[in-house]
Image: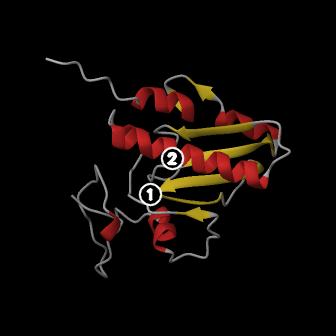
């Protein structure tokens, strides 16, 4: 297994491939660089679990991304465990707090994840959008389409909600 985040850890990764200069080419992750603080990205919030920053190509009045510090490739890497449920719940709370602070007059917010193969970067990221969309046609990218495309964060939480343990 390979870890693109070094000390931050990773899950469900693929084998390492190296370039001629010895650099790991298959596991490079720009979001892991953001977590490490090695980019010029403006950090809006960070703690030991998540980092939040503005989307580089915003699709709405306010468009933020909240990512886990641990490299989690996609929503398909999440399991129905208390830890993954708490991670996504925390990501959503951070996103809601940021939009409440930075877009208090926005009448609609949208929160969710792109599902493979429609995710652009293989590092889990929650899109936090204070509408309106800019331009309006971009709403198509952030509209749930069932089992493909965009999944609403609350629907993702439902999928991750741990099953109650039954006594034996």
* Contact, mark 2 vs mark 1 (Cβ under 8 Å): yes
Q: Is the C terminus in the top left, top right, bottom left or bottom right quadrant?
A: top left
Residue 77 seen from this side? no
Question: Residue 51: horizontal and vertical position, in percent?
Answer: 53, 61
Image color mode: secondary structure
Most foreground residue, 87 or 120:
87
Question: Residue 63: horizontal and vertical position, in percent?
Answer: 70, 51
Q: Reply above or below: 36 against 110.
A: below
Question: Which label's residue is closer to the chain start, 2 or 1?
Answer: 1
Q: Residue furthest front?
A: 167
The quarter of the displayed image where residue 129 is located: top right
Q: Reply above or below: 101 against 75.
A: below
Identify the disc placed on residue 107.
none
Most foreground residue, 159 or 16:
159
Q: Secondary structure at mark 1?
A: loop
The crowd level at tag 2 (other Cα within 10 Å; few <14, some 14-19, many 20+) is some
Question: Residue 97: horizontal and vertical position, in percent?
Answer: 66, 50
- Residue appearing at x 29%, y 52% in the figure: 11
- Residue appearing at x 61%, y 68% in the figure: 43
Q: Residue furthest bottom?
A: 21
Identify the disc placed on residue 49.
1
Residue that badge 2 annotates: 90
Q: Horizontally, is 49 left or right of 107 in the view?
A: left
- Residue appearing at x 53%, y 48% in the figure: 91
Q: Horizontally, is 155 left or right of 130 in the view?
A: left
Q: Secondary structure at mark 2?
A: helix
């Amino acid at each position: 297994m390979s870890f693109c985040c070094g000390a931050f850890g990773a899950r469900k990764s693929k084998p390492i491939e190296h370039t001629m200069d010895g650099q790991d080419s298959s596991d490079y992750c720009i979001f892991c660089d953001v977590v490490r603080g090695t980019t010029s990205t403006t950090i809006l919030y960070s703690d030991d679990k998540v980092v939040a920053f503005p989307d580089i190509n915003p699709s709405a009045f306010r468009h933020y991304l909240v990512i886990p510090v641990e490299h989690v490739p996609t929503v398909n890497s999440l399991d129905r465990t208390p830890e993954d449920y708490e991670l996504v719940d925390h990501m959503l709370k951070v996103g809601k707090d940021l939009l409440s602070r930075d877009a208090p007059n926005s009448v609609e917010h949208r929160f969710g994840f792109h599902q493979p193969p429609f995710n652009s970067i293989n590092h889990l990221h929650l899109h936090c959008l204070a509408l309106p969309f800019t331009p309006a046609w971009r709403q198509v990218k952030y509209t749930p389409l069932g089992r493909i495309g965009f999944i609403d964060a609350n629907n993702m939480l439902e999928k991750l909600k741990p099953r109650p343990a039954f006594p034996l």
